[in-house]
Image (cartoon, helix red, strand yellow):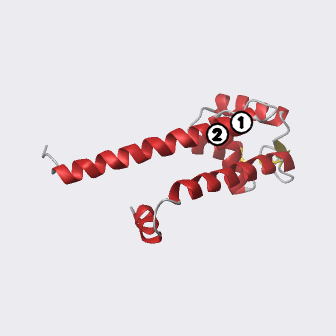
Amino acid sequence: MSEYPKEIKEQLEHMDRMKDTFFRHKKKLVEELCSKLPYNITPTKYYMLKFIYEKEKCMVVDVSKKLELSSGATTITLNQLEEYDLIERRRDSRDRRIVWLTLSEQGNELVRNALKKRDEFWGKMLAVLTEDETKEYFRI
């Protein structure tokens, strides 16, 4: 394995510090958001909600595949989200075997608020960069 020049090593170290800062702040943001909720939202539950939000309507198998969870783990988590009134399950009118998942208004609001907080987080983190640096950051 070849050794990187000193300048590249310094840049990698700088990028590593930036990554650590981003993740530390993102973790704090998620913890703050979740602590204000009247129910226990874990990262897995949040990613399920976000996936359903993005799809607007999907099947349990879609969630299972996307999050790489067993059908049992998916069902348990969806049951909890349903108990929190964040998702709704509806049987397909033409094929009763199919169960469609959608977010309730409360679930939609939760994800919209989380995405707003995410956008604010990235806005603050990227504010220190120039427009060209921001474009380069996204390009990379």
Contact? badges 1 and 2 (CB < 8 Å): yes
- Res 26 label: none
Closer to the camera, 46 or 103?
A: 46
Viewed as shown, does residue 13 lie left or right of 58? left
Number of marks in picture: 2
**Image point (70%, 42%), residue name:** 60
From the image, tell me which residue sits under label 1. Answer: 34
Question: Which amino acid type is shown beneath numbered disc 2?
Answer: Val
When the figure is inspected, residue 71 is found, relative to residue 26, above or below; the finding is above
Closer to the camera, 129 or 16?
A: 129
Label 2 SS: helix
Quadrant of the snapshot with the N terminus: top left
Image coordinates for residue 2, horizontal then vertical, percent: 12, 46
Viewed as shown, does residue 137 lie left or right of 112? left
From the image, tell me which residue sits under label 2. Answer: 30
**Image point (15%, 51%), residue name:** 5
Quadrant of the snapshot with the C terminus: bottom left
**Image point (74%, 29%), residue name:** 40
Closer to the camera, 64 or 35?
A: 35
Question: Which amino acid type is shown beneath numbered disc 1?
Answer: Cys
Q: Residue furthest left?
A: 2
Image coordinates for residue 97, horizontal then vertical, percent: 78, 43
